[in-house]
Amino acid sequence: MATTYLVDTDILIDYLRGDLKAVQFLEDHLSACSISVLTVTELFSGAKLAKQIRHVEVLVQVFKLFSLDLDISRQAGLFRAKYGASHGTGVVDAILAATAEKHGLCLVSRNKKHFPMVTDLLVPY
C-alpha cells in the first residue's frame, strides 16, 4: 500500500516561499498528500496581502482535507497534556498528530521535536 501523507503547515509555507526542497517534495508526492483543516487556518492566518491569499486559496484546493472530530480532539488533548511542556507541542501540532494516527497517515514536518508521539514521521529535508 502506498504511503499517504499529512503535510504540516511548515512544509506548505516553505513551498509558498519558493523553497526548492519543499517544491520538489510536493511535486514528487502531490497525489499522496493531504492536509488538516487547521493547516488551512494557519495558512490563511499568515496571508496578509491579496496575492498571498490567492496563492493559499489555489494551494489548498489541491489537497484532500481532514476535519476535526471528537476522537481526534480527545487524542489531541491527551497528546498536548503529555508533550506540551516537554516538547513544545502546541494544540495544532497535537491535532495533526492525532489526525495522522487516526487515519494511518505519515506526518510530514520539519519540526521533529513537536511530534514525539508520532511513529510515522517524515522530515523531508
Image (cartoon, helix red, strand yellow):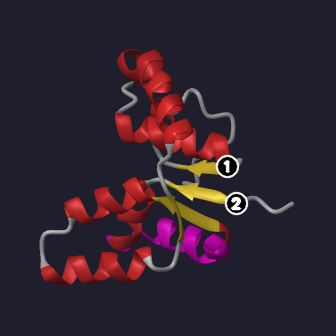
- Residue at 46% across / 71% down in the picture? 20
Does residue 26 belong to the magenta stretch? yes
Q: Is residue 37 above or below residue 112?
A: below
Q: Main secondary structure of the magenta part?
A: helix
Q: Secondary structure at mark 1?
A: helix
Question: Does residue 4 appear left or right of residue 90 in this picture?
Answer: right
Could you say where residue 23 lies in the image, as x and y percent from the top left?
A: 49, 73
Mark 2 or mark 1, which is nearer to you? 1
Q: Secondary structure at mark 2?
A: loop
Query: Which label's residue is closer to the chain start, 2 or 1?
Result: 2
Q: Nearer the viewer, residue 1 or 109?
A: 1
Could you say where residue 34 lies in the image, as x and y percent from the top left?
A: 57, 64
Q: Nearer the viewer, residue 2 or 103?
A: 103
Could you say where residue 33 lies in the image, as x and y percent from the top left?
A: 60, 66
CB under 8 Å between discs 2 and 1: yes
First to last magenta residue range: 17-31
Q: Is residue 21 above or below residue 84?
A: below
The amino acid at mark 2 is Thr
Name the residue carrying label 1. 103
**How many other residues sit within 10 Å of disc 2, few (<14), some (14-19) or many (≥20)?**
some
The image quarter containing residue 53 is: bottom left
Mark drawn on residue 36: none
- Residue at 26% across / 83% down in the picture? 54
Name the residue carrying label 2. 4
